Image (cartoon, rainbow, N blue to C red):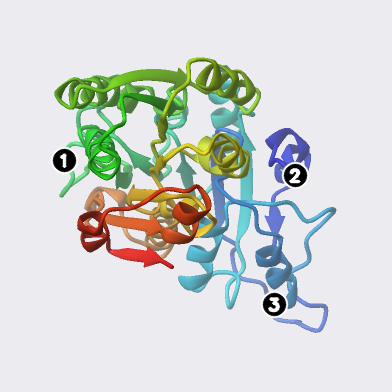
Amino acid sequence: MRLRAVAVIFFLALGILAVPLASDAQQPAKVPRLGYMSPGDAPALDIAFLQGLQDQGYILPGEIPRYDPAFWRGLVKQGYFEGQRIRIEIRATNEQFERAPKLADELVRLNVDVMFVIPVLLVKAAQDAVQKANKAIPIVFGPEFDPVGMGLVKSLARPGGNLTGLARVDPEFEGKRLEILKDTFPRLSRVAYLTNPAWYLDYFLHAKPAMEAAARAMRVRLETFEVNTPEDLEGAFAEIARRRMEAIVLPMTPLLLAERHRIRDFVAKRRLPAMYGDPIFVEEGGLMSYGVSLAEQMRRSAALVAKVLKGAKPADIPVEQPTTFKLIINLKTARALGLTIPNEILSRADQVIR
């Protein structure tokens, strides 16, 4: 079932409060409170993680929701939920970004100890709410394009202020994915660029020209298909089929990750070569990917949140940049689609799934 934030916002608004067992008679310590602000769709589903919280003695009210597992696992790795209680207040815009200021104000009024926010539209709303309230609530942002240029931090090494977080790859990187796809299938002439600009508009405005320049250099006709809600996918699929696109390239966005099974099924039905922006697509049956893992970046985000909760100041925590880029190829999928991957490309791959 597709993850829809509207189905869980009621529960999320309650937060997750770890309560001590009845036998614990000691005076409880202050429970740190994390404000988690998201657009509405998480990149993956994971019920087992929250069931693990219950195994640790945590009592979760109501139905167990499905969150972004990489972030929560990252918090577990940092020691939270295992030996320390934490309250999580989650606010999701449900893809209605105009709601961001109101939701940010709610988290500020709750006086959370730290906020984790993604993407940049929500980050700016959170920062405005903090400044308006004349508070210094620390904010950790998820992977964002050019945090310095967007005015989030003074520099990557010394952010200053109350924000720190992760930087995304340079938009020029998108053209590299197209280049690898063309090297793999030299006869390609029409490629669909399926993208999600609403969540990462600043990145998209730089990435699209980079993709178009790369396409011109390779004499490839590139057509862009924008998907800003899950409902947009069917229309995009119909247009890709109608225009007889020969391949598809996807960037790394949480919305596309959340809808990856629908995307993968469409690509398989059309027997299209596809280059994805996140390895999870290939691990689950996609053809090839090049880039960094969003799941790993979410784990790193959790580590930064943990640093702040343990007393570090965002001003002194450098913004982390991705350093590992992997080309992953699924030969099982290639065979199922009747595609041949040249040995030259296989030799360049960091991982080949056989």
Circles 3 and 2: CB distance less than 8 Å?
A: no
Depth check, mark 2 against mark 1: the one in front is 2
User: Which disc, if any, is residue 1?
Assistant: 2
User: Mark 3 and mark 2: span between their CA atoms?
Assistant: 27 Å
User: Which disc, if any, is residue 155?
Assistant: 1
Identified by mark 3, the residue type is: Gln
The numbered mark, 2 or 1, whose residue comes first in the sequence reads: 2
Query: Image point 42% across, 48% down: which residue?
Result: 339
Task: Work out whether 75 lies above or below 142.
Answer: below
In the image, 33 versus 191, the foreground residue is: 191
Identified by mark 2, the residue type is: Met
Q: Name the quadrant containing residue 311.
A: bottom left
Q: Name the quadrant containing residue 312.
A: bottom left
In the picture of the structure, the residue carrying the numbered disc 3 is 56
Q: In this view, does 47 lie to the left or right of 290?
A: right
Depth check, mark 3 against mark 2: the one in front is 2
Q: Name the quadrant containing residue 93.
A: top right
In the image, 29 versus 208, the foreground residue is: 208
Q: Quadrant of the N terminus?
A: top right
SS under mark 2? loop
Q: Position of residue 41 (x, y in %)?
A: 60, 38
User: Label 3 neighbourhood size at 10 Å, few (<14), some (14-19), many (20+)?
Assistant: few
Identified by mark 1, the residue type is: Ser
Q: Position of residue 258 (x, y in %)?
A: 58, 42
The numbered mark, 3 or 2, whose residue comes first in the sequence reads: 2
Query: Image point 69% across, 66% down: which residue?
Result: 48
Query: Image point 77% across, 45% down: which residue?
Result: 11
